[in-house]
Image (cartoon, grey):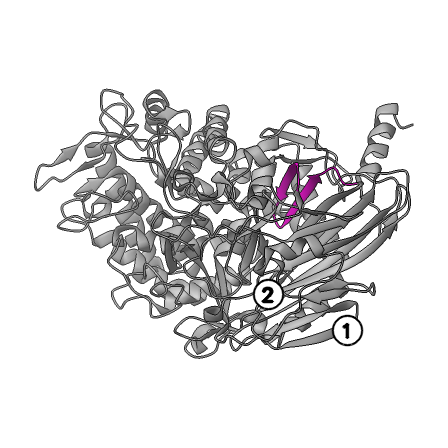
Amino acid sequence: MKSFLTVLLAVAYALARPAGEVGAAPQKLFPTELPSLQWTTFAAAGFSQPAAGILFKTGQAPCCGVALGGIGTGCIRLDADGTFGYGNLFQNYPRQPKLCQPFLGLSVGGRTWVLASSKIIRGGVMEESIEPAAGCWDPKLTPPTRLPALTSVESAREIHYWGHYPVADLEYETDAPVSVGLRAWAPFLPGNAEASNIPGAVFEVYLRNLSSSAQKGTIAFSFPGPTAAEAGTENFPRKSVTERGFKGMLVSGTAVNYAIGMVGKAPARFGRDLNADPSVWSRIDQGLPEADAKAPGTSVAADFSLAQREVRTVRFLLAWHVPHWGKGNYTRWYAGRYTDAAQVAVELAQRHAEFLQRILAWQQAIYTDNGLPVWLRDCLVNNLYLIAETSEWAQSKPPLEWAGAQGLFGMVESTRIMQQLECIPCSWYGNIPIVYFFPELGWSTLKGYKQGQRADGAAPFVFGPPPAEMDPPGAWDNQISLNGVCYVDLVDRLWLRTGNDALLREFYDSVKKSTTLTATMGEPPESVISMPPGGGTEWWEGWPWTGMTAHAGGMHLSNLAIAARMVDKMGDQVFAQQCRKWLAQGQKAMEEKMWVGDHYLLMWNLNSGKKVDKIMANQLDGDWANLFHGLPGVFRPDRAKIALDTVKRTCLVDVGSVSFAAREGEPELTTYGIFPPEIMILGMTFIYHGARDTGLEIVLRAMDNLIRRQRIGWDLPNMIRADTGARTFGTDYYQNLMLWSLPAALDGQDLAAPLRPGGLVDRVLKAAQQR
């Protein structure tokens, strides 16, 4: 027999789900009365079990909102102030200034509400959107354009915002007799790269008559379209499209096109972008401004009639089509399936219900994992936005004809700051979700690195120059001490995930060449754990590393241990013996020369005599790399625990960790910042060594700082200050996808464990495929 509480919860979740096209008993998408800026669980529309997340309000908005887009499609941000923010739907490298444009308006009883914050309506912008300190735009870039103040309209009193990538849910507070909720989303289905490569988004508007009488009104949606430079023309011919559930307009430039319209058969009106002349918002119930051939933007409006307490769902749809990008004229993967945006729109109109159900299903698989803390469930879902923001997926057409059946996939280091594609350490940090959910894309990326490998075995640092070029590869000598380590790790990562020995056979020779270079490039006499002669740089840039180092040296040892396992599988006994000889030499040098009683030296050059005795928080990264790959750590286990005790005593701070502490134990709060993914690695290193609570607390502090304190959870940085937690460099860095390594560490398992039956990744993949 079901308990009273069980029945009560079931009723609550049922009521939380919105009605269909027309219904009664209007309900919100999520509860708006909960405290903002707090991780919590709650009943939400479309979920049969509690969801997890943080709710934001206008006065405490994140700097950027959810990215609406998928794999290699481009995206547009839907910000918490009710505006479109950054976007790269149409060729934007680097990102253009924030649009800061409202997109949704409501008219009832002769009054019009533009559903954005009051500051936007008054002709301003949200400070959260433009403060350089928040890092949402680089001060060297042009700030957002302020719209003229909108006249004869009212704004939303409050906007409640819940983001759960690829979905943004908004509840608007106004004094209108009709309340409005918005669920905007884009297709993103783990395990299905093709379905996640649909360049479009759906905007589901829930109109709820709260009054005791019937209400008539208009709901309008506006989109600015491409600039003339993006479109390759100043002329934008339009074509009406009515096909299989989509009613809309196809707007074409020379290089791009987009489709905008509605799902279903209800009448719709079309005009030009409402923000081109903001005064027209107040007249959306009377008509939309006519779009001429010079107007790149489009608006669409639907009139409605609601009985007392009635709910109606109106679905706007936006699709885009940009078949090529870059100087290399690379052809996007989706252009092989769609000839224009109208075809995209028709497919979305037909499959919107299926796609949304599957999106919420895979999210629920995470939200219901009670073995994960609530904050981590939310972060794992939203962390995936970085794929939409940074990914490119090209067909195997010139100049990439060598890429093979899956084309070439890569991610841009930072779409506003560093637009180079596939910086190899960024992928070492950040390709875990690609490996888990889209291994065929990870395989294609490895082909790109193999293609660009130098004759001496050096892996390329990048696929091509900025902005987002996929060839020619280069910068082999930049951070050469760790590039090969990354490459070998990435190959092993995908081999462990797939269990496919064909992958190992394809990349074995390149792994062997890379490993040989890594083990022999260092300055003698302890070359295995040393930097190249003359010194060099690694991930902690800013000064020359020289001689033996604990961090890079430990990563070299990890490379050798990982390679030895691959060599064993290939039956190459001679090279297996050589790898183990190098490994033993390096470990002996590390323990005999770098250990100083409670930690490992930062670096020591035996030839010059230069010795730096700082405590590096991440001195044991090589241990984490091996343990994550199911191998023993490379440092002595007893000393690793002592070193972690030292790090705990000297390096842990409110934001997680500093990078370095003085030998005397004082943390260096301002000398050098810290990389959030390295804080994650540090936490996982503690966890793998038995200090689960400490490790989890380290990662929690990092995420709490980024998401709740700095409010940059959808604009994750490369580096932060260790004293205040503020961003010091980088926007939308896909390095932060490292977080997806944490579930395996929490279970004390290797990276393949979440893929086994019943594991988190296995459950997400299965939920995303259910129809």
Residue 14 versus residue 238 in the image, above or below: above
**Coordinates of residue 269 in the picture (x, y in percent):** 75, 65
**Coordinates of residue 207 in the picture (x, y in percent):** 79, 47
Label 2 residue SS: loop
The residue at the point 66 percent across, 47 percent down is: 152
Question: Is residue 175 highlighted in magenta?
Answer: yes
Is 388 left, or right, of 662 in this rendering? Answer: right
In 3D space, how far apart are the residues under numbered discs 2 and 1 (Cα atoms)? Answer: 22 Å
Mark 1 highlights which residue? 243
Name the mark nearer the viewer: 2 or 1: 2
Please state, as top left, top right, bottom left or bottom right, where the N terminus lies in the image: top right
Q: Nearer the viewer, residue 83 or 203?
A: 83
Please state, as top left, top right, bottom left or bottom right, where the C terminus lies in the image: bottom right
Residue 474 image label:
none
The residue at the point 68 percent across, 77 percent down is: 239
Is 248 left, or right, of 644 in this rendering? Answer: right
| Residue 354 seen in this snapshot | no
Residue 22 versus residue 300 in the image, above or below: above
Is 546 left, or right, of 83 in this rendering? Answer: left
Magenta range: 155-176
Is 375 left, or right, of 178 in this rendering? Answer: left
Q: How would you rate the neighbour count of disc 2 (Cα within 10 Å): few for under 14, some for 14-19, many for 20 or more?
A: many
Q: How would you rate the neighbour count of disc 1 (Cα within 10 Å): few for under 14, some for 14-19, many for 20 or more?
A: some
Residue furthest to the left = 608
Q: Nearer the viewer, residue 663 or 414?
A: 414
Mark 2 highlights which residue? 297
Q: Nearer the viewer, residue 622 or 62?
A: 62
Q: Nearer the viewer, residue 571 or 3?
A: 3
Label 1 residue SS: strand
